[in-house]
Image (cartoon, helix red, strand yellow):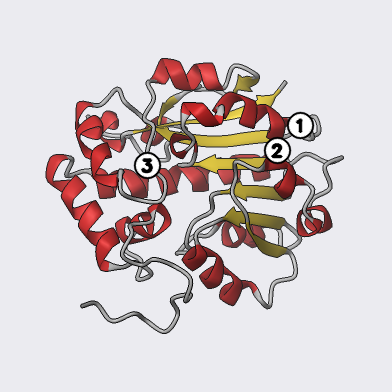
Amino acid sequence: MEEVPSWVPSQIDWNQPSVARIYDYALGGAHNFESDRRAQDAALEVFPYLSDAARANRAFLHRALRFCLDQGIRQFLDLGSGIPTVGNVHEVVQEVDPESRVVYVDHDPVAVAHARSMLTANPRVVILSEDIRAPHKILEHPDTLRLIDFQQPTALLMVGMLHYVNDAAAPQRLLRDYQAPMAPGSYLIASHLTSDLPEMRAAAPFFDDSRNPMTLRSRTEIESLLADFDLIDPGVVYTVEWRPETPPGDHPERSACYAAVARPR
C-alpha cells in the first residue's frame, strides 16, 4: 500500500484520482498519488502525447499571460488553478510587475493546501477553496474583493477547466456570470480539451473515475461557448498555434486542446 505523505490533508480520498493531481503528474510534479499516476498512464497507452499536451497547455498560459500584461492587465482571477508548479501565474505576472495581484481558486484539497503553504509571504496572492460552479461565492468572496477591483480590467483564467463543466452545469451561463462584473478592457484566457481528436476521445474514459470527469467538445462547440466574447486573433486554435514563439510543428492537433483569448462584450 502506498504510504500517505505528510503533506496530504486528512480529509481527502487519495485513492480516487484527481484532475489537479493528474495534471501535476503530467507536468512532472511530485504532488500526486498512485491512483492519479495509474489514470494518466492508462490514458497514455491510447494517446501517448497526452503529457506533451499538458505542457503545451502550460506554455499557452504563459504566452496569454504575457499578452494580457502587455495590454496593461495587473489583476488575475485563476479558476481551477490546480497544484502549484513551475511557472505559476503569480510568478509570471509578478516578474513583470511585482504589484500584480492573483486570486487562485480550486476545490482540490491538495492543491489548496500546497498553494497556501507557498503563498504565506505574498500579500498580493491568495487561494480560495471553492468550486468554480459557484461564481457568486467566488466573485463576492472577501479575499477576491480585497485583491481585485472589478472597476478595473481583469484577466479571467479558465485554462483547462471548461471541459470539467458538463452540459448540465450550463457552462455558457457560468461564463456569463463571471463575465458580468468584468470592466471594459478585461480578457478571458481559456483552453478546452477537444472531441475532434479520436485519440483524445479514447483517452477521456480513463478519467471517468476522477472527481471531475471530462466533457470533451468540438471546436464548433467551444466557439459557441464563447459566443458572448470577441476573440483575439488567431481565434480558437490548438494551444501550440496560439501566437507561438516557435513553429508549432507538423501535428498541432496532438496538443489535444483548443485555446483562445477573448474580450467580454
Q: Earlier in the sequence, mark 3 or mark 1?
A: 1
Q: Pinpoint residue 214: horizontal percent, then vertical percent.
A: 37, 38
Q: Nearer the viewer, mark 2 or mark 1?
A: 1
- Residue type pointed to by label 1: Gly
Q: Residue at x 38, y 60 (%)?
A: 21
Q: Does the residue at mark 3 contact the one at mark 1 (Cβ under 8 Å)?
A: no
Please tell me how crowded label 2 is: few (under 14), some (14-19), or many (20+) other residues with Cα within 10 Å: few
Reply above or below: 247 against 231: below
Q: Residue at x 30, y 43 (%)?
A: 208
Q: Is residue 241 left or right of residue 75?
A: left
Q: Nearer the viewer, mark 2 or mark 3?
A: 3
Q: Residue at x 37, y 42 (%)?
A: 213
Identify which residue, 163 or 55, lies in the foreground.
163
Q: Residue at x 56, y 55 (%)?
A: 106
Q: Does the residue at mark 2 contact the one at mark 1 (Cβ under 8 Å)?
A: yes
Identify which residue, 47 or 262, lies in the foreground.
47
- Residue type pointed to by label 2: Gln
Q: In the rendered image, which residue does mark 3 sit on?
A: 213
Q: In the rendered image, which residue does mark 2 sit on?
A: 71
What separation in Å lies between label 3 and label 1 (alpha carbons)?
33 Å
Q: Is residue 103 left or right of residue 218?
A: right
Q: In the rendered image, which residue does mark 1 sit on?
A: 185
Q: Quadrant of the C terminus?
A: top right
- In which quadrant of the rendered view does residue 173 lie? top right
- In which quadrant of the rendered view does residue 112 lie? bottom right
Q: Pinpoint residue 191: horizontal percent, then vertical percent.
A: 47, 35
